Image: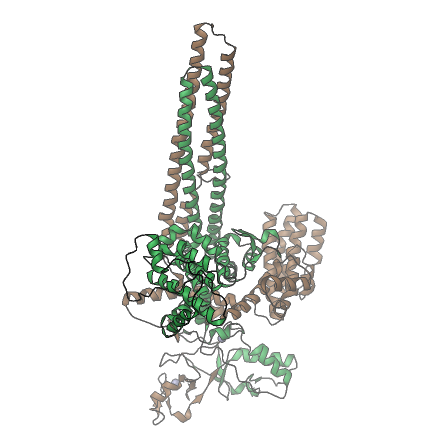
Amino acid sequence: MGSLIHEPSTDFHLKLNEQLFHIPHELLRKNVRQVHKLIERESSTLQSLFSELNVSLQANSLDQDKLALNKLNEIIRKVDLFERKLTKRVDEELRLLERIDSRLKFFHGLQNAKESQDVSKLTDWYQKYTNVLIADYLIRNDQVHLNSLQDDEDSVTLQDGKMWNPGVTYLKQQQLESLLDYDILLAANRISKSLTVDHNLEPLLHWIGENKVFLKKNRSFLEFEARLQDYVELLKAGDYKSAIGRFQKFLLPFVESNYSDLKLASGLLVFINSCRQEESKLQVNDSIDPQIITNDENNTEPNLRSKDDIYEHFFRKKVAKRTSTPPTVNKVIFKQYNKNADLARYTDLLDQKRWSTLNELFSKEYYSMYGISHKEPLLMYLSLGISTLKTKECLHRKEFVSSDNPKLDEYLQKDVLGTTCPVCSEEFAPIAKDLPYAHHIQSKLFENPVMLPNGNIYDAKKLKALALNLNRSNLADLQEFEVVDPIDKKKYPETDFIKMYPT
Amino acid sequence: MSVLLNTLQQEFDKLYTENSTPREPIIKKCHDETSSLKTHLKKLKAHLSKQIEEQEVLSDDCPEEEKKKIIRKRGVILEKLNKSHKHWDHSIKKQIKHISQQHVKFNKVALTKLYEFDLDKVYVNKLPSNSKKLVDDAISFHISRYNMGNLSATNESDMIRYLRDVYGISPETSSKFVQMGQIVQDIKKGDSSSCQEWCEPGSPLNFELYVLKSLQLFKKGDTLVTYNHLTRKLPASSFIQVTTQVSPILTQLVLGEKVHDINAAIHLQLEKCISLFTKEYCLKNNLPFESPLFLIVLSGIISFQFYIKYTTIRAASHVDWTTKDELPFDVQLPEFLCHFHPIFICPVLKEETTEENPPYSLPCHHILSKKSLDRLSKNGTTTFKCPYCPVNASMSKTMRVKFIML
Ligand SMILES: [Zn+2]
Ligand SMILES: [Zn+2]
């Protein structure tokens, strides 16, 4: 199938957008798995209920028959409940299938435009496609707001309530909501923003909890990093007791995979505490003993048999035993750390940048789970598109010579020489600056190139049309067979035209 | 023919029950089996209740015959109950197996064939880090250009406020499109009078609006009004179009026929008017007809296939390449994306001319780049022959030229 504007084939587009089918298919599979489980559970429940029923009905007595009737009632109730659960699953299945269906229709639309050779239909299709890309970009990047400004129908229900986001609103206004799995993107954005803006780990930890199997399969460090952040934040807030509690509960399980990180984390407890003491002479939280830092820097991993061993290893002595701590000890330790290379590692651990690193890590896992590109497709198309359109002449200001007629100058500059090149537009010129140029192997010029004595080469017809136009609108007073060069604003007779052969 | 699309469609259709209208997902069968089990059980429950009632009125010393009857009845109920249960158990398990298989097949036969590109790998030349604000601006312009007609707000200040509150679009950008958006809103509501007022008499838009109005009147069914409109409001200078577009309506009107699928015809004409109107509006107000963002995205999509082809070839030949200064492949773009700037490729060096290496005209009016002139004239020390004709030239007889697109 040939293309109308050198656009790729429908199959190529399908490959570019495989996630449009991949995601609902994954959700469908999940749904079927749930149905499977439901059926298995129901089947075994009914199996045992029916054997009880059988026993009663085989007893040949009125009392047992009555018991059997009760049993049968129970069975009917069970079946009824099961049927209702199935209805929900069937509705979900239908919803997901419809999503795929509308996507198939979308690509059939592309195929139809191609087959009927209808360029305007094709352009409309690409308009829609672009609008989906924009919505995708906005959903991923814009703030997710609690539902207050918008109508109810514009909001999306996420795990933590009703939300709205400009991207979803745009998608709905363009009636393209079936072409994007926006709930999935929005949920990701919600978690990202809670990390980078609110510094809140709750939504992330919740997601981690729901996707433990996937993360484990991927050998992801996301959970460890999140738990570590949690611990660090508690330390920063001065809540040492909770910090140690979390350390024991959530970080110790990683002792084998992240031993050195754990060592650093436990050291941080002392470090941050001593810094605090230096800063102000506040009473140290009496549960902290600066001796708890491990000093076997060069030792190999010790043999840690029990949880208590591990805990003992990292926090040498039990907490909350001493009531007073000689301040000199703290000072000494702090000074030691000043010399220590670990200082940089501690400050890294305390750095606000860790929030965005954590977000990066999360996004990667999240998008890979759904097979969605990590970067916004819009940006990828913009990068490729800018380079494809960027010529050597782009971004250069044309030099103008002013004439004694400002009106003429304005008209020529704006309406005649002004370019509609998208790369040269206000928004894209600064972006295009450092991107590669297009590669051309053929000249792309114009019909009837003629040169004026000043070396400027124009399309002869257009130059003549311009002259006519200027005369008509009284911007210039030209003789017959006379033109104006819009660059140097001088008049030239058509007899000066030199036909050029740019091969 | 689109191979993948057809396969995808075929396999997708198998996720629905064959010939069901409205289409039912195959999973619905599990539900139906359960419903029918429930019905059976309820029926058998009624039988059992009745049987119990019968037993209760029977006295202990009733004839053996009666007792045997009870046992037989109970036996029948028991048998039917077990049969229903077994049937359900067997068939629901068969169904769910079938469904799971069909899903697997959909993935295997259709979906896996789509997995080929990794978009993250294609995004090689990242946009500079300060692009966010600029991309947002470009989106603002795009939304103002294409989404005004979809807003529920109709009043100028409401529209501007809405776009600012929801999309963060500056009033400076959105205000350029307010009038356009309002007129589009009107057309969509079926009222094209504001557009009629806006457009110039005798323009193509004027004619299309006339056709739209005719169709709308025709649908209402008032023959006389339609006839008057068709004959009296006919814009001048559109006789050729009349024969193709108006005459058929007129004929059908006279014959009292119904226009086939009038709603679809109106919708199509409506879209045509909106597209023409927005084009004229942008032209008149010196706004780009399509948003720069759209044109760039479109170019990006077109170039993607060239990019893929190139990487495949390069990967096969194990050659490293960079795209830092210039894309390493040539992209064929449609005409309307080709003529923003003149592009001159020096016929000798096959390189695009630039500020540093500008084009020069020879006395024979053939054009070469500065670099090739330097090479041919040994840096201006000798005369040389034009590579395209027998004319002799020297450096002093060449002239720097400039291509200018109007
Ligand atoms: Zn340009
Ligand atoms: Zn020559």
Q: How is the image coloured?
A: by chain
What residue is rendered at 57% in x and 84% in y?
A483
- Give the color of chain A as drawn: green
A260 to the left or right of A357: left
B392 to the left or right of B342: left
**Quadrant holding the N terminus of chain A:** bottom left
Q: Is residue A372 shown to the viewer in this render?
A: no
Residue B188 image position (x, y, % from top left): 63, 56
What residue is rendered at 55% in x and 79% in y?
A417
Q: Give me the chain that's brown.
A: B
Residue B62 image position (x, y, % from top left): 47, 5
What residue is rendered at 38% in x and 69% in y?
A345
Residue A107 image position (x, y, % from top left): 46, 54
Q: Nearer the viewer, residue B406 or B252?
A: B406
Q: Quadrant of residue A40?
A: top left
Q: Nearer the viewer, residue B77 or B231?
A: B77
**Quadrant holding the C terminus of chain A:** bottom left
Q: Nearer the viewer, residue A217 or A32?
A: A217
Residue A325 image position (x, y, % from top left): 43, 65
Against A323, is B375 above or below?
below
The total number of labels drawn is 0
What residue is rendered at 45% in x and 74% in y?
A390
Q: Is residue A403 shown to the viewer in this render?
A: yes
